[in-house]
Image (spheres, grey):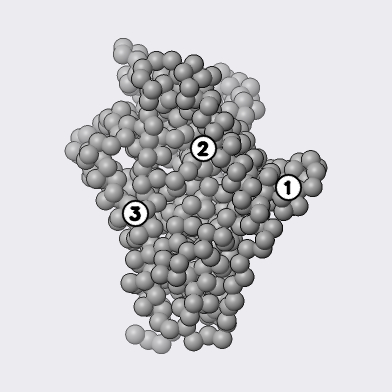
């Protein structure tokens, strides 16, 4: 090989980076997609394409021309409603009000540091991966806190700091869709999935809830923790070898005021949980359902429909208590300022919601989603792609797309109106489709140079290796991505074969 000539892997990374950088910003991308929907609706409507509505026997659905006089009236009269009605908008903002207080008071950071520093040395790798996975409850806080902390811990223990950084990064990003608790990710993706299901069967969509994948994602925490630790100690760390750098680290534990804050915030969580349970468990409780046995009354209940404000409260209350104890909150103005700062950080999401809301609404109004779902299902049936091969194919397609489009929201907002109806037509539940999507999306986050925090991770790594670049970091993270994707997919297949519900009211079949 000629000196300086790039190998296949490096050329592939260059292609991914160059191709991804040529894609429009997600805000622009959705605006373009909305325009394409308008043009396609005008092109296909004269062809008289129609299908029988899968949820309404004897009802025929045709593509609507959104550039007709009636369609143009709809576009202008619905623009604001499309934005306000974008499924994840309100629920994500409400959830982030609570999570933002917990993050900005320092509670999340103290929890992560306290957990990792308290883990015995022989379990430190598993502890790092586990903490990374659990950090998704605080949205993106884990990206900033855990990778540099993991590097520092490994360096202080005489291990290679980049292995500690990689383990934490794998947990935070690769395990983003696994958690013992419900998080903003469940809220955001769940609302898009429910909206996609409503294209085929609005009545079914009304029975769905954002905890639809909870059983599976909770079990996934332990599977991914084991895989992440095994990959770190058996593949990544031996490959990195001994660390010969001069960067030494000394870890400081939590300050006494932080420990006090954690204790009192723990008490606050316990009290809030007890109050929440009192709203649903006792007979005739206000948030308990009225039909079926106890489990049915909980699953099909106002409680399950109220998970968004409950999640927000369960973060807000301990965050508030921690802030008061540690003096990061001194009065109500501080609380209002922290909430305001959180909403300010959501500015890009709000702009994205405007253009994404138009695309989703136009797509649904034109009936192209429903028509595409029927024809897509017929095509898959004709090539006999069903069951496990279908699920695995969908995971692989999503995994590849994720390398080029890093935003989970943007991808699912584009894919849910198409793939959820198709999979429902094939007899598979929206809950299963969402879980397959989440597996693929999380597993390849850590090898996408276009992932939002990829550059930050490189900056952290360069503290210990000045030559660290995109190719080097990706080569370190590839084993995690491969084993997460394979192990997690196998887990879903086993789950599917045994017919285990994915979550409360989360069946595998439609």
User: Which residue occupies 47% across, 25% down?
Assistant: 281
SS label for mark 2: helix
Instruction: Please identify the quadrant where the N terminus is shown.
Output: bottom left
Q: Which mark is residue 187?
A: 2
Choose between 264 and 89: the one closer to the eye.
264
Q: Secondary structure at mark 1?
A: helix
Q: Residue furthest toward the top?
A: 58
* Residue 279 can be seen in this image: yes
Tag in front: 2 or 1:
1
Q: Label 3 belongs to which residue?
A: 223
Name the residue: 22% across, 39% down.
Answer: 498
Q: Position of residue 441 (x, y in %)?
A: 42, 50
Using the rendered view, name the quadrant where residue 247 is placed.
bottom right
**First in residue order: circle 1 vs circle 3:** 3
Dot 3: within a 10 Å radius of its alpha carbon, few (fewer than 14), some, or many (20 or more) residues? some
For the residue carrying disc 1, how many other residues have a C-alpha within 10 Å: few (<14), some (14-19), or many (20+)? some
In this rendering, the label closer to the viewer, 3 or 2: 3
Q: CA distance from mark 1 to mark 3?
A: 37 Å
Disc with the residue nearer the chain's start (3 vs 2): 2
323 horizontally vs 295: left or right: right
Residue occupied by mark 1: 324
Q: Which mark is residue 289?
A: none
Give the side of residue 67 with respect to residue 317, left or right: left
Q: Gap in Å between the C-alphas at discs 3 and 2?
A: 23 Å
């Amino acid at each position: 090989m000629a000196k300086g000539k790039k190998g296949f892997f490096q050329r592939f990374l260059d292609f991914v980076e160059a191709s991804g950088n040529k894609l429009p910003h997600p805000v622009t991308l959705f605006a373009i997609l909305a325009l394409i929907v308008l043009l396609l609706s005008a092109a296909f409507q004269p062809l008289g394409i129609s299908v029988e509505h899968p949820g309404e026997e004897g009802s025929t659905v045709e593509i609507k021309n959104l550039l007709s006089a009636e369609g143009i009236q709809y576009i202008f009269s619905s623009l604001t409603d499309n934005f306000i009605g974008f499924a994840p908008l309100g629920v994500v903002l409400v959830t982030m009000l609570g999570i933002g207080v917990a993050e900005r008071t320092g509670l999340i950071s103290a929890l992560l540091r306290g957990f990792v520093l308290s883990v015995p040395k022989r379990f430190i790798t598993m502890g790092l991966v586990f903490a990374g996975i659990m950090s998704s409850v605080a949205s993106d806080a884990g990206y900033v806190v855990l990778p540099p902390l993991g590097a520092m811990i490994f360096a202080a223990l005489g291990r290679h700091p980049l292995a500690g950084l990689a383990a934490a990064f794998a947990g935070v990003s690769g395990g983003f869709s696994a958690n013992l608790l419900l998080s903003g990710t469940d809220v955001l993706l769940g609302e898009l999935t429910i909206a996609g299901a409503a294209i085929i069967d609005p009545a079914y969509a009304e029975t769905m809830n954002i905890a639809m994948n909870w059983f599976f994602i909770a079990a996934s925490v332990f599977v991914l923790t084991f895989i992440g630790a095994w990959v770190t100690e058996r593949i990544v760390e031996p490959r990195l070898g001994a660390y010969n750098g001069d960067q030494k680290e000394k870890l400081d534990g939590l300050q006494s005021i932080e420990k006090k804050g954690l204790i009192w915030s723990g008490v606050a969580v316990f009290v809030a949980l007890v109050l929440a349970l009192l709203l649903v468990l006792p007979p005739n409780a206000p948030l308990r359902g009225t039909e079926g046995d106890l489990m049915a009354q909980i699953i099909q209940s106002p409680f399950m429909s109220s998970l968004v404000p409950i999640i927000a409260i369960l973060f807000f209350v301990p965050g508030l208590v921690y802030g008061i104890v540690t003096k990061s909150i001194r009065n109500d103005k501080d609380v209002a300022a922290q909430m305001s700062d959180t909403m300010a950080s959501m500015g890009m999401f709000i702009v994205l919601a405007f253009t994404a809301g138009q695309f989703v609404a136009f797509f649904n109004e034109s009936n192209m989603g429903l028509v595409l779902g029927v024809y897509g299902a017929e095509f898959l049936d004709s090539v006999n792609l069903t069951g496990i091969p279908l699920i695995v194919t969908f995971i692989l397609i999503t995994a590849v797309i994720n390398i080029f489009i890093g935003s989970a929201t943007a991808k699912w907002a584009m894919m849910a109106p198409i793939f959820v109806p198709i999979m429902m037509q094939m007899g598979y539940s929206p809950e299963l489709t969402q879980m397959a999507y989440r597996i693929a999306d999380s597993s390849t986050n850590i090898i996408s140079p276009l992932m939002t925090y990829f550059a930050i991770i490189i900056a952290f790594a360069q503290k210990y290796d000045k030559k660290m670049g995109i190719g080097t970091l990706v080569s370190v993270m590839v084993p995690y991505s491969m084993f997460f994707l394979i192990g997690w997919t196998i887990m879903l297949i086993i789950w599917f074969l045994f017919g285990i519900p994915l979550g409360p009211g989360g069946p595998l079949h439609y």
